[in-house]
Amino acid sequence: MNYTTPYEPPTLTVDLVAFQVVDDSLAVLLIKRPHEPFQGAWALPGGYNPKGETTQESLYRIVLQKAGVNTKVDLEYIEQLYTFDTVARDPRGHAVSVTYMGAGRNITPVGGSAEAVFYPIDKLPSLAYDHDRIIEYAVDRLRTSLMSSRAVAAFMPEKFSLSQLQKVYEIILDQTIDKRNFRKRILSLDLLSDTDEMMRDGAHRPAKLYQTRTIDQKRVILTKLFSSFTYSDGAVSVKYSKFASVIANKTLKTKEILGR
C-alpha cells in the first residue's frame, strides 16, 4: 500500500485507576493537573511512555513522581485494564492510553509533584480527558474481579471476619447483601481458608477469622463462581471478565446473592 503522507505514530501514555475503601466508600486516586491541557482539572495519574520503558516501568515512575504512590508497594492488586485509543481523546493529538487498575488499603499519597487525593466514586469532580469513562469501565471490571480472592484480598486485612468481608462487598457493589445467603455462597466458593482464630469485639459473639486463599490454594469452578454473584440489579451480561471465553453471553441475576 502506498501512503501519500509520512507515517505519524500516536503518542503512547499510561494511566492508573487505583481504588481503596475510604470512610465506607469506594474511592479512586486523582491528581490535580498543574499544566494545560485541562490545567486545574482532576485526572487519573498518568503520563508519557518513552522509548526504552515498558508500560509497567513507566507507570511505576510516573505515579510515584506525580501522585506519591508506589505501585509496587501500595497496591496489593494490579492488572492491565484496557487500551483506550479513541482518536480525539487528547486535544494535543492522537494518544493511546494503556491503563492499569489496582487496589490497596491505607494508601496515603506522599511527596508527589501534584496534589493527589482519593475521591469517592459517587462524588467525582469534573474530570480531564475521557477519565470519567475510564473510571466507569474500571468500576465494572473491579466488580467482576471481586469474584477472585486476589482482588478481594487487596481491600482486606490479612485476617478478617465474614462480616468485614461482606461490608467490603457491599461498599464496592453498592448494594445491600443478605447476610445468610452471602455467607453460604462465599464459603461454598473455596476463596477463603479458616485461620482457626477468633475475633472478639466487646459484648458481641466472637467471630471466626479467615484469610483469602493463595493462587495455588484456589479451587474455583468458574461456572459455579459466576452463577453465584453479580453486581447489578436485574439481568446483566458480563462484558469485561477475563473469563469471558468461559461465560460468554451468560446472563446473571441478583436474586440468589441478594436474597430477593
Image (cartoon, helix red, strand yellow):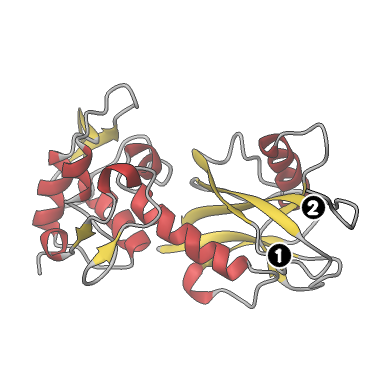
Name the secondary structure under disc 1: loop
Name the amino acid type tagged 2: Thr
**Image position, residue 238 (x, y; %):** 32, 57
Mark 1 neighbour density, 10 Å: few (under 14) some (14–19) many (20 or more): few
Q: In this rendering, is residue 182 above or below 131?
A: above
Disc 2 versus disc 1: nearer the observer: 1
Q: Which mark is residue 11?
A: 2
User: Looking at the image, which is closer to me, 95 or 25?
Assistant: 95
> Foreground: 19 or 6?
6
Could you tell me residue 72's position as x and y percent? 61, 34
Residue 203, horizontal then vertical, whole percent: 16, 52
Q: Amino acid at mark 1?
A: Val
Q: On the rendered structure, is 253 left or right of 216?
A: left
Q: Would you name the residue on which mark 1 appears? A: 87
Q: Is residue 224 visible?
A: yes
Compare marks 2 and 1 and give the one earlier in the sequence.
2
